[in-house]
């Protein structure tokens, strides 16, 4: 009697600890975006009082009715307003710089 060389199963069984509810345990938000995010203003456009070219601004999560080409930016007045995304460039900040920018925006 010949035994086939291919097996239908590798014979592993999930243990109780290996069961999953289908959610990731990474703790990262949907789409991998964390807020606040940080952007450098490259064009103050029409609003040179509320924005300064070259300054880093915190950007918060958009609201449901926000236009997709706008960013909700915490401006010089400490308020969040929509500005055109083309006026900003995203930047990654180290943790210490993140805290400094967030602290300045809260004042």
Image (tube, rainbow, N blue to C red):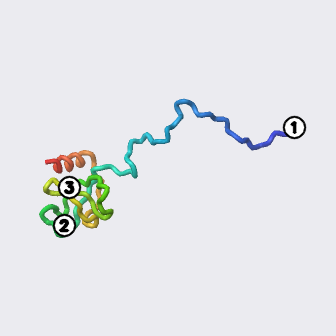
Left or right of 101, for residue 21? right
Q: Where residue 13 sits: x, y (%)? A: 62, 33
Picture quadrant of residue 86: bottom left
Q: Where residue 40 sits: x, y (%)? A: 24, 60
Q: Residue at x 29, y 52 (%)?
A: 61
- Closer to the camera: disc 3 or disc 1? 3
Q: Residue at x 22, y 45 (%)?
A: 99
Which of the two discs, 2 and 1, labels the residue nearer the N terminus? 1
Picture quadrant of residue 57: bottom left
Cα–Cα gap, marks 3 and 1: 77 Å
Residue 1 - label: 1
Cα–Cα gap, marks 2 and 1: 82 Å
Other residues around mark 1 within 10 Å, as few (<14) / some (14–19) / many (≥20): few
The residue to which callout 2 is attached is 44
Helix, strand or loop at disc 3? strand
Q: Residue at x 23, y 57 (%)?
A: 73
The residue to which callout 3 is attached is 80
Q: Where residue 106 sits: x, y (%)? A: 16, 48
Give the quarter of the figure containing the N terminus: top right
Q: Residue at x 17, y 54 (%)?
A: 79
* Residue positioned most to the right: 1
Residue 83 - label: none
- Closer to the camera: disc 2 or disc 3? 3
Which of the two discs, 2 and 3, labels the residue nearer the N terminus? 2
Helix, strand or loop at disc 2? loop
């Amino acid at each position: 009697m010949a035994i086939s060389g291919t097996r239908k199963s590798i014979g592993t069984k999930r243990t109780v600890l290996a069961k999953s509810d289908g959610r990731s345990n990474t703790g990262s938000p949907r789409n991998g975006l964390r807020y606040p995010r940080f952007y450098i203003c490259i064009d103050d456009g029409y609003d040179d009082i509320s924005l300064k070219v070259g300054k880093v601004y915190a950007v918060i999560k958009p609201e449901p009715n926000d236009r997709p080409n706008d960013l909700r930016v915490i401006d010089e007045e400490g308020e969040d307003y929509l500005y055109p995304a083309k006026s900003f460039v995203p930047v990654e900040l180290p943790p210490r710089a993140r805290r400094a920018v967030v602290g300045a925006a809260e004042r």
